[in-house]
Image: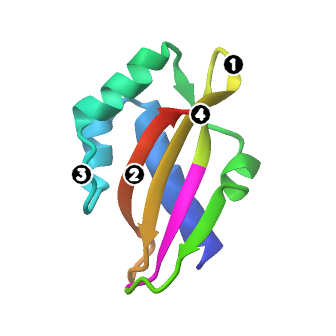
């Protein structure tokens, strides 16, 4: 895994979530069952306003290789941050898929409270 490419990919997703551009997040998704409505409901039901996490948090996201996957895949979990509370209980889970170019392909797996 290329950590810089992972950070760039995840940062792009986070920036779109923070801006409320859920449709653009879904446009980047290559195979998830999550919809714009799913993202909207999960975030709005949490009742707080997303903000960008510190860079160090993005760099320390949980990354686990999906063994035997072709192309190579990695499961990523990252705590989301809110204006009201900083690090929140809301977690974003996604899969990064190896691909050429500056970004990994993305599958959104879940957004939920832990």
Q: Which mark is residue 114?
A: 4
User: Is 107 on the left-hand or right-hand side of 82?
Assistant: left
User: What percent of the width, then of the height, locates residue 24?
Assistant: 28, 44
Q: Secondary structure at mark 2?
A: strand
- In the image, residue 68 lies at what x, y percent? 46, 86
Q: Secondary structure at mark 1?
A: loop
The colouring scheme, among rainbow, by chain, secondary structure or one colour, is rainbow
The single residue placed furthest to the right in the displayed view is: 56
Q: Height in image: 15 above or below 101?
A: above
Task: Give the alpha-carbon distance from disc 2 to disc 3, as whole Å.
Answer: 14 Å
Residue 76 magenta-highlighted:
yes
Q: Quadrant of residue 23?
A: top left
Q: Tell me how far mark 4 sits from mark 1, CA to CA.
A: 15 Å
Residue annotated with mark 2: 109
* Magenta-drawn segment: 71-77
Sequence-wise, the earlier of marks 2 and 1 is: 1
Say if 50 sits above or below 16 in the image.
Answer: above
Rendering coords of residue 85 (x, y %) = 69, 18
Circle 3 residues within 10 Å: few <14, some 14–19, many ≥20: few
* Image quadrant where one finds the N terminus: bottom right
- The answer to which of marks 3 and 1 sits earlier in the sequence is 3
| Residue depicted at 71% across the width and 41% down the height | 54
- Nearer the observer: mark 2 or 3; the answer is 2
Q: CA distance from mark 3 to mark 1?
A: 29 Å
Marks 4/2 in contact by CB < 8 Å: the verdict is no
Task: In the rendered structure, find residue 85 and report the number of the disc placed on it.
Answer: 1
Give the number of the disc on residue 27.
3
- Which residue occupies the foreground of this view, 78 or 15? 78
Residue 7 location, x and y as percent? 59, 61
């Amino acid at each position: 895994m290329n950590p810089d490419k992972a950070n760039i990919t995840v940062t792009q997703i986070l920036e779109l979530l923070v801006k409320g551009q859920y449709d653009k997040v879904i446009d980047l998704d290559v195979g998830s069952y999550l919809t714009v409505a799913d993202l909207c409901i999960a975030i709005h039901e949490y009742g707080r306003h997303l903000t960008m996490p510190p860079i160090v948090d993005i760099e320390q996201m949980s990354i686990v290789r999906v063994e035997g996957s072709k192309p190579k895949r990695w499961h990523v979990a990252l705590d989301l941050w809110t204006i009201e509370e900083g690090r929140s209980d809301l977690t974003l889970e996604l899969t990064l898929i190896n691909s050429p170019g500056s970004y990994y392909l993305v599958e959104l797996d879940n957004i939920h409270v832990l």
